[in-house]
Image (cartoon, helix red, strand yellow):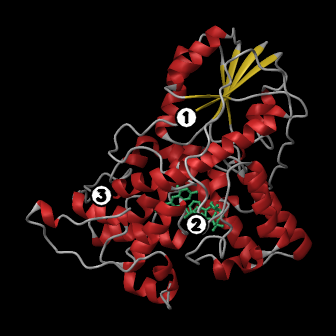
Amino acid sequence: MRHLYWFRNDLRLNDNPGLLAHAQAERLLLIYIWPLNQPWCNVTGMGAQRERFLCESLQALRKGLSKLGQNLLVMHGAPESIIPQLVQEHAIDRVGASRAPGYYERRTLELLAARLPVPLDIHENGTLFREQELPFPPGALPDHYTRFREQLQELPLRQPLPRPDTLPHPPAAPFHPIPDPPTRPHTALPVRGGSLAGNRRLRQFVFEEQAIEHYAQRRNCLDGLDGSSTLSPWLANGCLSALEVATAVRRYERGHGDNESTRWLLHELLWREFFHWRAYRDDINLFRAGGGQRRLHHCSFEPRSFARWCAGDTEYALVNAVMRQLVATGWASNRGRQIAASCLVDELKLDWRYGAAFFEKHLLDYDVASNYGNWQYIAGSGADPRGGRHFDLAKQAREHDPEGTFTLKWGGERPSQPEYVNDAADWPIVDP
Ligand SMILES: Cc1cc2nc3c(=O)[nH]c(=O)nc-3n(C[C@H](O)[C@H](O)[C@H](O)COP(=O)(O)OP(=O)(O)OC[C@H]3O[C@@H](n4cnc5c(N)ncnc54)[C@H](O)[C@@H]3O)c2cc1C
């Protein structure tokens, strides 16, 4: 039997049920297809740091595969066209891919299944719990996080699966080199893609530096690597599985006892879980301005305000610093994201989806469910029982950057701009 396995957001060998399920084939073609731009959004392309992290993750995956006598075919285009063609060229009998929570990603799987002359196996490997382990059917997911967490936090965790010992050889195919990343990691966030780097960061955060002990106190730090785990880029690309992270935290708790910080980190993984299952349930509503609500949602767009927000050139120095950090490094802390998102929605009065699309372009950890779910939460069209979060930006600056160190580091103070421009010559100059 000749199988094809399509890696998506599961760029790892460990704890990968999809890959293991195809390890018994006689020949196995492993592929990755570069993500396409969103169909509706005018913020296009992938930021240089996000692209860099993805290239590194693919190179690392290929290196790991080569030790098992395998390779990775990296392609560009529409999966529903490419894969049937490969099936024909290589006489493939069976195709496998992982499930994904995003509407467009699922739609692609449906189109693919309809065009394939062979069976398509869809594997669950993006969430902590499998669908059958949930205490409710996905359609009956609690509307709010607290109720969700209460029902899941005591569930036992499975053991992560081992990596395959061997893999069948690939059929002959043109395995072109994976392009070198377009940039280097920013010195302020020196994180590299790939499972090896992800596991190293997990070990460092939990066991070596035991920074997990202070997570509850430091998670709101605005700079990377100082406070929270910074594991999200590896989780989002699937270089680490949520189960690997959760079992490492539980192992730490067995050795050192649990405390507020360890429990809080596990709760954050449940936020990820909540947004993933919510995205499955909400379908296309994840991209609607009002979410699943049947009321009119504030929805506007003003290009100049949006351009200034993207460039970190607004009237709000802390927001500018966060946006400049995001574009330069591909990362912003959770607190920084909340502050920047609230500014776009509540101060600039823009449609949240433009902000979400800009985050999608730049975040190393872009994850459709977490990104759009969190944006909806802040905009008041999602899972927030309070109907949205309006952050007092001056208070946020006093509390989270009292000395202004973060704002200074990222050049958040900007010269003030005229309120209106009457002439093209007055158009603000924004240096990204
Ligand atoms: C507007 C906005 C957009 C966001 N977009 C994304 C995104 O595209 N991808 C993404 O992974 N996270 C997103 N988040 C959630 C959160 O900001 C990041 O997961 C977190 O900052 C990553 O840093 P960390 O790994 O140090 O997290 P930690 O605080 O160390 O938490 C550990 C893990 O828990 C998960 N997690 C933590 N907070 C959240 C949360 N609020 N929602 C979902 N999962 C969470 C992440 O997987 C994270 O790696 C967004 C938040 C906001 C407010």
The residue singled out by tag 3 in the image is 351
- Residue type (three-letter) at the residue carrying disc 1: Trp
The residue singled out by tag 1 in the image is 34
- Residue type (three-letter) at the residue carrying disc 3: Asp
Name the N-terminal-most of marks 1 and 2: 1
Residue 387 shows up from this direction: no
Name the N-terminal-most of marks 3 and 1: 1
Q: SS of the residue at dot 1? A: loop
Q: Nearer the viewer, residue 234 or 184?
A: 184
Q: Is residue 172 above or below residue 17?
A: above
- Rounded to the nearest whole Å, what is the CA distance between mark 3 and mark 1? 28 Å
How many C-alpha atoms fall within 10 Å of the one at disc 1: few (<14), some, or many (≥20)? some
Residue 146 shows up from this direction: yes
Give the residue drawn at x 85%, y 49%.
Answer: 159
Ligand 1 lies in quarter: bottom right
Q: Position of residue 323 (x, y in %)?
A: 43, 67
Image quadrant where residue 186 sits: bottom right
Query: How many numbered marks appear?
Result: 3
How many C-alpha atoms fall within 10 Å of the one at disc 2: few (<14), some, or many (≥20)? some
